[in-house]
C-alpha cells in the first residue's frame, strides 16, 4: 500500500539501488468504460513502489512505461536477478528520481502481459483466456485506470508524471485529461502522434505476428503453442528502429562471426546474430496479443485530432510545467517531433524546458545513463522537490 518500501539492501546489490522489490496487485471491481466502446467489468493492475510516501502525500512520482515495458522499473526481485528493473539507471537513492525524496509508482498497463489484466488473463464471463477477445485499449484508457490506482494509493496529485516513448504519450494525456492531478510532466523521446512511417513499422510487426501459422487468429494458447517466429520478426524490426545507424555501426560494423563467408542464409554477420538473439529472447517473454494491442495504442494516440489538428488547443487544459527531452540520433521519434510538441506548448502559454541531447544511441538513449541526460533530468527533478517543499527522508 502507500507506505510500502523495498527490503533492506544487501550485497551484491549496489548501494544506490532501491534494493529487493516485491510487486503488488491492486484489484478494481468498478467497471471501466473503454474508448473502443466496450466495458471491462473488473481488472487488476500490478505495480511496484520505491521510497516512502510522505505525510503530505505530495512526493509521489508516476512512471509510465513504453511499448514492451512493465511495472519492474527499478531494483531487483531477488538476489539471483541477472539485471535490475528497466529504468534502474534513473530511479534510486541519489539518482535522477531520488527515492530519498520521492515515492515512485510504476505499473504494468492494462492489456499487459506481466500480471495486469490483459489477453493472457481469463475472461470471467467465459472462463477462457481473453486472448484476441481482450478489448482494444488506448492511452486514454491507461490513464483512466492509472487515476484509479492513484486513488487506491491515496495520491491526489503527483509531484511528477514521467515517461519515455509510449510512456511520454501517457504523460501528455495525464496533463490534459487530469490537469489538476499533475504538478510536473517529463516527456522523453516521445511524439504527439505517430508519423506514417512509424505506423508502417508497427503494421509490419503486426503482420509478422498475425501471419505466423502458430498464431491461430490469436487463440494460440488454446493450441498450446506460441507464434514465436512472428514475435521474433516483430522484435527484430522494432529493435532496428530503436538503434541509430552510428550505434549499430560502432557496435557491429560489418564484423563476421567467423573469418570466412558461408555463402548461405545462416548467421554470418554479428549484427544478424544480435538481432536474432533479441528476437528469440523477446518471443519467450512477451505475449503476441499484447504486442498487437500496444502497437495499436501507439498508432491511435493523437490528442490534436479532436481539435482539428491544433495541438496547442489540445494542450490548453494542462496546468503544469513540462520538461521535454529528445535525442539527436533518435530516428523513431526524432527531435523535430519533440520541437513540434514544444512549439505547441509555447503557443498554448505553457511553461516548458526543452533539451535535445547529443547521443549516439538512437531511441534507446532514453533508457541509458548518459552524463548530460542525467544532469538535466536530476536538475529538473531537484527543482520539482524544491518547489513542492519535498525534503529528503531521514
Image (cartoon, rainbow, N blue to C red):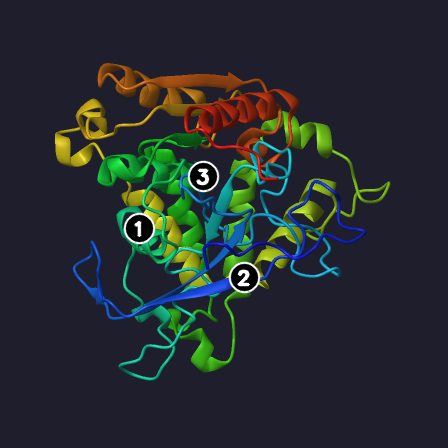
Q: Which mark is residue 23?
A: 2
Q: Which mark is residue 382?
A: none
User: How far apart are labels 1 and 2 at the CA level?
Assistant: 19 Å
Residue tagged 1: 147
Do we see residue 211 in this rendering? no
User: How far apart are labels 3 and 2 at the CA level?
Assistant: 20 Å
Q: Is residue 217 above or below residue 81?
A: below
86 left or right, relative to 331? right
Q: Is residue 174 above or below residue 74?
A: above
Mark toward the start of the polypeptide (3 vs 2): 2
172 left or right, relative to 244? left
Look at the numbered disc 1 and give the secondary structure of its residue. helix
Give the percent coordinates (x, y) of residue 84: 66, 50
Mark toward the start of the polypeptide (1 vs 3): 3
Give the image quarter of residue 98: top right
Q: Residues within 10 Å of mark 3 (few under 14, many from 20)?
A: many
Amino acid at each position: 500500500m502507500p507506505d510500502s518500501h523495498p527490503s533492506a539492501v544487501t550485497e551484491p546489490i549496489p548501494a544506490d539501488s532501491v534494493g529487493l522489490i516485491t510487486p503488488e496487485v491492486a484489484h478494481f471491481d468498478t467497471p471501466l468504460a473503454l474508448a473502443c466502446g466496450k466495458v471491462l467489468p473488473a481488472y487488476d493492475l500490478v505495480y511496484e513502489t520505491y521510497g516512502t510516501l510522505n505525510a503530505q502525500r505530495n512526493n509521489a512520482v508516476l512512471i509510465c512505461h513504453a511499448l514492451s515495458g512493465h511495472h519492474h522499473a527499478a531494483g531487483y526481485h531477488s538476489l539471483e536477478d541477472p539485471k535490475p528493473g528497466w529504468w534502474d539507471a534513473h530511479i534510486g537513492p541519489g539518482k535522477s528520481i531520488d527515492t530519498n525524496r520521492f515515492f515512485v509508482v510504476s505499473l504494468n498497463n492494462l492489456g499487459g502481459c506481466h500480471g495486469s489484466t490483459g489477453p493472457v488473463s481469463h475472461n470471467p464471463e467465459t472462463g477462457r483466456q481473453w486472448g484476441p477477445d481482450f478489448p482494444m485499449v488506448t492511452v486514454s484508457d491507461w490513464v483512466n485506470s492509472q487515476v484509479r490506482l492513484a486513488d487506491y494509493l491515496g495520491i491526489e496529485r503527483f509531484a511528477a508524471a514521467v515517461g519515455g516513448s509510449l510512456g511520454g504519450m501517457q504523460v501528455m494525456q495525464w496533463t490534459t485529461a487530469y490537469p489538476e492531478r499533475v504538478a510536473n510532466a517529463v516527456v522523453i523521446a516521445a511524439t504527439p502522434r505517430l508519423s506514417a512511417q512509424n505506423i508502417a513499422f508497427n503494421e509490419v510487426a503486426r503482420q509478422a505476428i498475425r501471419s505466423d501459422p502458430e498464431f491461430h487468429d490469436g487463440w494460440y494458447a488454446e493450441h498450446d503453442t506460441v507464434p514465436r517466429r512472428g514475435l521474433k520478426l516483430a522484435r527484430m524490426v522494432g529493435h532496428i528502429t530503436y538503434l541509430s545507424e552510428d550505434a549499430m555501426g560502432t557496435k557491429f560494423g560489418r564484423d563476421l562471426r567467423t573469418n570466412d563467408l558461408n555463402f548461405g542464409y545462416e548467421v554470418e554477420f554479428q549484427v544478424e546474430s544480435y538481432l536474432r538473439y533479441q528476437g528469440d529472447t523477446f518471443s519467450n517473454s512477451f505475449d503476441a496479443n499484447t504486442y498487437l494491442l500496444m502497437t495499436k495504442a501507439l498508432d491511435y494516440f493523437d490528442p490534436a485530432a479532436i481539435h482539428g489538428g491544433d495541438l496547442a488547443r489540445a494542450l490548453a487544459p494542462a496546468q503544469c510545467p513540462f520538461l521535454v527531452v529528445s535525442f539527436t540520433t533518435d530516428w523513431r521519434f526524432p527531435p523535430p517531433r519533440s520541437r513540434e510538441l514544444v512549439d505547441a506548448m509555447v503557443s498554448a502559454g505553457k511553461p516548458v524546458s526543452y533539451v535535445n541531447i547529443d547521443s549516439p544511441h538512437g531511441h534507446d538513449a532514453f533508457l541509458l545513463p548518459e552524463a548530460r541526460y542525467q544532469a538535466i533530468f536530476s536538475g529538473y527533478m531537484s527543482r520539482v522537490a524544491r518547489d513542492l517543499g519535498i525534503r529528503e527522508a531521514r
